Image: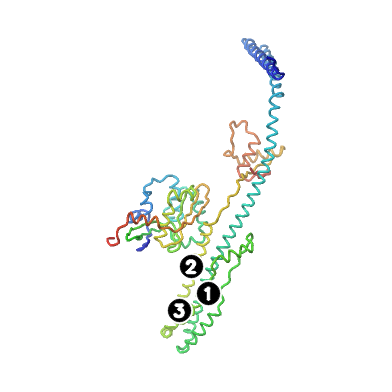
Amino acid sequence: MQLTTQQQGWVRLADMKSSLFEELQKAELEIQGILAEINSDNLKSAKSVMKEAKEKRMSFTRLIDEKLINPAMEYEKRMNQVISAAAVVELEMRKIAEQEALQAQEILNEEAALRTHIINEWFRIAAENRLNYEKAIEASYRNCLSCRVPVEKIPAMITDMQCILEQFEIPQMTKFTRGFVSDVRAMEIYNSIDKYDPVFDLMKAKKNAAERWVNYALDLANADVAIKALEKAAEERETAIAEEIAIETATNVLIAQAERVTIETPKIKREMKVVIVESEAWAKAVLVNFIKVFPVDKLRVKSWSKLTLAQMAEALGKSGAELTNLQMEEVCK
Amino acid sequence: MQVSNIQYYRNNFEAYHSMNGYSYSGITKASGVVPSEKMRLGTAVHNYLLEPEAYNHENREIVLPLANAVRDEIGALLPFLDTEVSVSADFEYSGLIMPYKGRVDMLRAGKIVLDLKVSEVPLRNSIPYFGYDRQVNGYMAATMCDIGMIIRIDPKSARVEKKMIPKDHSWWEEQILRFGVPKEIY
């Protein structure tokens, strides 16, 4: 059978390998023979034989490197270049997606905060409005006692009181500062929440006003004591309302937090790394910082004697410690 | 389901344990578990935050950050909450009555129940596995609260997760049918 040029080359390589190994074996045996008697000359000769054998071995392995291994590795190098370039693009895409997700999350968070704000504000406004009606009626009642207004003048007083209550303006909603939610979306949220309607409370307050003076004649009999008792009761009522508002507000905030939707963000691994600078000063800075921080928990070394500056710098980057005279950079993966 | 005869107790866990009534852990036989290291850590966080007099100040460096993280999350509501409250009530359904007992971590009676869990397991997994939603619904029913929430703190990362528990008495109604007695002889 006729061999191709390439096949002939492989056969020749096999022959070269066999003859090399024979020569290497001979050299090994020769050294064993020389060193049967140990002296300076024999040691020198043995070293010379070994040097010669090494050169023969290297000329063979160099040939394999040049003709076989290096050309084969070229494919990997080219593939790696393409993959690295693609990885850069893919990382950028993930960063953009992360940015978009974070922005969307911020909008969602703000929407939730706005919704909670409006709910809480309507609750506060309603509670304060009711309290304002109550306070006005109570203040008027105490004022009547204090001025010793005669009982016969009370019906007219009540009518006036009811007219005054009608003039009350409901408390204003405090402003919510938006950064992300659009005007249209904010309006949608605002409209989606039941608004406080003061009509029912006003009716109730007017009815309360009409009934409040039922015991006036009796209270007038000991007006000063009655005023003191009423003042204390009004104070307690105000405290209770404030507490009610605080509980409702805090509860709504907690609920809003628990119900908040979380958007999944693309996974980007971020690491801080020490920027490598090929200088003596950089090497000293790494050594100084390494001794100071000594981040052994961030090191993976098999042999302490082979610990390199690059490994020290890597461990320092992972340590999160504050480093001096070293520049840091964030690396995304 | 109707709830009546609600009574609150400020007692320690042993006293609660000796109270009459069906609790969630009693029904599900979860009350006899030997506590693991992680469970003991959970108890320590629990104690420090809710029953400081019962905290023995072991593992302070781990317990304090976790307790503080939970406290920050609950925020402005915390001063208005009662902590470690035992409650008993009569649960009534379909003509049967079952005595109930529960020990609520944090409570504003008539408003909100908060249950604290120290666990690495996300609530989406632990709630269906351990039936925490049923447990909290028992608390909610007995304390006349419409809002129930579980707050989980991860003992490793100190991250807090919160989840609302929808009001649902169906599991408790089933238990009343199992363990309840006719009203007439209760």
Q: Tell me the colour scheme of the image.
A: rainbow
Q: Is residue A295 left or right of residue A149?
A: right
Q: CA distance from mark 3 to mark 2?
A: 24 Å
Asked if marks 1 and 2 fall on the same chain, the answer is yes
Where in the figure is residue A333, as x and y percent of width and height?
Answer: 63, 42
Q: Nearer the viewer, mark 3 or mark 1?
A: 1
Q: Is residue A56 left or right of residue A218?
A: right
Q: Which mark is residue A277?
A: none
Q: Which mark is residue A228?
A: 3
Q: Quadrant of the C terminus of chain B?
A: bottom left
Q: Nearer the viewer, mark 1 or mark 2?
A: 1
Task: Report in which chain the residue with disc 2 lies.
Answer: A
Quick one: label 1, few (<14), some, or many (20+) residues within 10 Å?
A: some
Is A11 drawn above or below residue B28 in the view shown?
Answer: above
Where in the figure is residue B102, as x and y percent of width and height?
Answer: 38, 56
Lower sequence index among marks 3 and 1? 1
Q: Nearer the viewer, mark 3 or mark 2?
A: 2
Answer with the quarter of the image where residue B81 lies: bottom left
Answer with the quarter of the image where residue B175 lies: bottom left
Closer-to-camera residue (B127/A307):
B127
Q: Which residue is pictured at 42% across the width and 44% down the height? A: B36
Circle 2: residue type:
Glu
Closer-to-camera residue (A214/B51):
A214
Determine whether the residue tagged by mark 2 lies in a helix, strand or loop: helix
Task: Report in which chain the residue with disc 1 lies.
Answer: A
Answer with the quarter of the image where residue B91 lies: bottom left
Q: Which residue is mark 2?
A: A244
Lower sequence index among marks 1 and 2? 1
Asked if the residue at tag 2 contacts the one at tag 1, i.e. Cβ–Cβ closer than 8 Å, the answer is no
Q: Quadrant of the N terminus of chain B?
A: bottom left
Q: Which residue is pictured at 66% across the width and 36% down the height? A: A310
Q: Which residue is mark 1?
A: A198
